Image: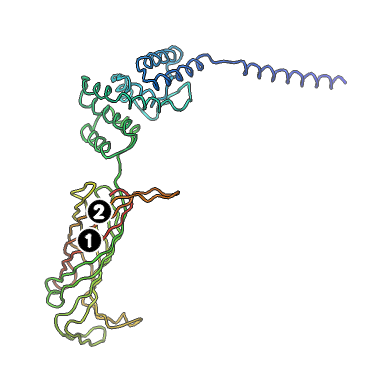
Amino acid sequence: MKKLSILILICFLSLNTKAQIQEEIINYTDSTAVLIQNGRQLLAQNLRYSDIKKSQEIYYFLDSVTNSIDTNMHAFFFNEELALHCLFQEWDSFLAMAATHNSTDEWFCYSCTNGMLFNILEAIDANSDIIEFGIASSNLSNEDADVIQLYYHLVRSRKVDDLYSQKYKAFKNTYTHSKYNNFINQYLFKPRINAHWSFSIGPNYIYPNLELKEHFEPNMGVSFDFSFNFNHLLFSLYFSNASLHSKYAFSVNDNSYHFNFDEHEAFIYNEIGGLFGYSVLYNKHFRISPFIPLAVTSIQSNRFKGDEKKNEYKAFNSFTTGVGLNSEVKLWQFRLRDKHTDMKSFLSIKIQMGFNTIFDTTNKNVFYIRTGLVWGFGDF
């Protein structure tokens, strides 16, 4: 009986303690958190009303509250505070944050309310003329002005466009040891990477030269390729085919066969390989890219079928390389959209011309012109 009474007493005390803790939690109020939350909401309201002076006063008050309690706590997230300094044209504070930024540093904020940054960016848009005049008339060094302009362009455009990419690369090239490198590399968006893949089909013209010119006439054919462009770099896999006719009748022994070829008899020209190029002229509508091909090229007769194809006479079958020039003009840019896809696409025309040297025991090379209609996916 005594043990039962003790057990009941313990249960009662446990329940009573839990009830007290629950009541303390319910009645607890963090006055600082409430003050900051209300202040943020009031600031957002004044930003929507474009009352910049009142918004600035609220910001200063909330900043002083957090600094008086804990210098490691903030009333705003890093991106919010940075945008507020831009809105208020407080360039010294903005540059100080940019210069000391490190992604490994912890930034603690009292509030987790979403939507504040949107209100700040909307206010920047509404006051863009004033802010741009403030940047232009401020007494800043070129480096300071350029990092502000880079950030300002990004928050105004809300995307990584061509101009932002140009500004980003120019800043990196001009200020290689900038004090803002961490801010540029870790916080700002990277520049746009112009990349696309494409395939094309079209006619080609093969012109045998040197010793080949003595035996075969030039002729038209067809070519296919699959290409990938990454910024200025070009890589392509291609196949080229044509029918070349002999200039005169001739006889030859090969693989235990004796061949008597007629004048104007068709021989098959095949070239399969890859090419590597670099765009020396490149914009949204046009590109010119010198390239070096690496391929295997052959000219063979066309007399057998099926399994006997292996007995064809090969004038040569050899590794080839050379130099060429790729020119491409964009015709039409469009988007492929459905409920699962939203992809940029384009149509263009390209012309490739060059010559290949054939590496065998004789002196041979081939001039060519390849044209094609291109269907590409990505940024031209």
Foreground pick, 301 / 245: 245
325 with respect to 199 (left or right): left
Q: In terms of secondary structure, where does tag 1 sit?
A: strand
Q: Quadrant of residue 222?
A: bottom left
Q: Residue reaching furthest right?
A: 1
Place of residue 112 in the rendered image (x, y in percent of width and height, measured from the top left): 48, 25
Tell me which label, 2 or 1, sits earlier in the chain: 1
Cα–Cα gap, marks 2 and 1: 26 Å
Q: Quadrant of residue 176?
A: top left
Q: Which residue is mark 2?
A: 331
Place of residue 183 in the rendered image (x, y in percent of width and height, measured from the top left): 32, 30
Residue 28 vertical placement versus 242 (above, below): above
Place of residue 187 in the rendered image (x, y in percent of width and height, measured from the top left): 35, 32
Q: Residue at x 31, y 80 (%)?
A: 309
Residue type at tag 2:
Leu
Q: Residue at x 16, y 64 (%)?
A: 355
* Within-10-Å neighbours for mark 1: few <14, some 14–19, many 20+: many
Q: Which residue is mark 1?
A: 293
Residue type at tag 1:
Pro
Pointers 2 and 1 in contact (C-beta within 8 Å): no
Q: In terms of secondary structure, where does tag 2 sit?
A: strand
57 with respect to 89 (left or right): right
Place of residue 269 in the rendered image (x, y in percent of width and height, measured from the top left): 23, 73
Q: Residue at x 22, y 61 (%)?
A: 293
Q: Residue reaching furthest front?
A: 49
Dot in front, 2 or 1? 2
Foreground pick, 102 / 3: 102
Foreground pick, 206 / 50: 50
